[in-house]
Amino acid sequence: MSDKVRIALQIQPQHADYDDIRRTVAKAEEMGVDIAYNWDHFFPLFGGDPDPNAGKHFECWTMLAAWAEATESIEIGPLVTCNSYRNPEMLADMARTVDHISGGRLIFGIGSGWFEKDYVEYGYEFGTAPSRLRDLDAAMPRIMDRWSKLDPPSTRKIPVLIGGGGPKVTLRITAEHADVWHYFGTPEEMAGKSAILDDHCARIGRDPAEIERSVGIQQHRITKDLEQNADAYYDVGIRQFTIGLSGPDYPLDGVAEWLAWRDAKNAG
């Protein structure tokens, strides 16, 4: 993976009309943001009143296909798609299709799932955290195998992003399959998890430098993290910084400052 810093936005598809979401993606591309992510849920995760999980919401992969047509240069992807919601072979084909629509700009983010309301309301078996991780572990080789069989094949080796920090299973799956690892934490916490990921890579003979390290930045900390933590994250190997934005307003305040910091780092 490149050692260059990349700035991403997670444009959370909640509490907004789609026109507002589309305009935000277009503005992100215009500003020079590297990646636009959404997420794979069926209900808001927060912000509803009085129910935090109530309000406007849109589906992940249908939206990514639309973004693929509406944009030209920004990379796109789910942060992250839930392995539980789709057959692995079908999910692989959906991703390959969005890869083609976008001209090779898809990042395939995937995780084991956790939001119980999605499962209950849409009729999926929630299971347990260990059972969902076992399902993800079993799905990854199936996804890779289906990608090898599809005609036409993907336009490039689709980068795989795995989200999560479980030291025994999630980070082992990441070492085996991912090009990008994403997590939330302080610089110290990210360094600790990253070291565990390195250990898993060593066990399977993989160069840990092949895996880009990504951290989530919450909107309310966008300025504070830039001022207090950005350099510390960089020093422990983080190269992708993903700022979460929620509807209806999707405020871009502070994003330009992160882009300027990126450019200074990459010029150094």
Image (cartoon, rainbow, N blue to C red):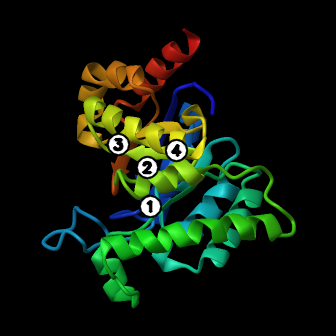
**Cα separation between marks 2 and 4:** 32 Å
- Residue in the image at 23% along x and 27% along y: 224
Per the image, label 3 sits on a secondary structure element best described as loop
- The image position of residue 181, as x and y in percent, is 48, 45
Q: How many numbered circles are shown?
A: 4
Q: Residue furthest top?
A: 268
- Residue in the image at 36% along x and 64% along y: 14
Residue that mark 3 sits on: 251
**Along the viewing direction, whichever of 195 and 248 lies nearer the viewer:** 195
- Residue in the image at 27% along x and 36% along y: 189
Mark 2 or mark 3: name the one nearer the start of the chain: 2
Question: Given contact means CB atoms under 8 Å apart, are the residues at marks 2 and 1 in contact?
Answer: yes
Instruction: Identify residue type, mark 1.
Output: Trp
Mark 3 or mark 1: name the one nearer the start of the chain: 1
Please identify the quadrant where the N terminus is shown. top right
Q: Is residue 103 above or below residue 234?
A: below
Instruction: Identify residue type, mark 4.
Output: Arg
Residue that mark 1 sits on: 39
- The image position of residue 203, as x and y in percent, is 52, 44
Say which of marks 2 and 4 sits in front: 4
Instruction: Identify residue type, mark 2.
Output: Gln
Q: Is residue 23 visible?
A: no
Q: Is residue 76 visible?
A: yes
Residue that mark 4 sits on: 203
Say which of marks 4 and 1 sits in front: 4
Q: Residue furthest right?
A: 152
**Along the viewing direction, whichever of 229 and 7 lies nearer the viewer:** 229
Q: Residue furthest bottom?
A: 123
Question: Given contact means CB atoms under 8 Å apart, are the residues at marks 4 and 3 in contact?
Answer: no
**Cα separation between marks 2 and 3:** 12 Å
Q: Residue furthest front?
A: 203
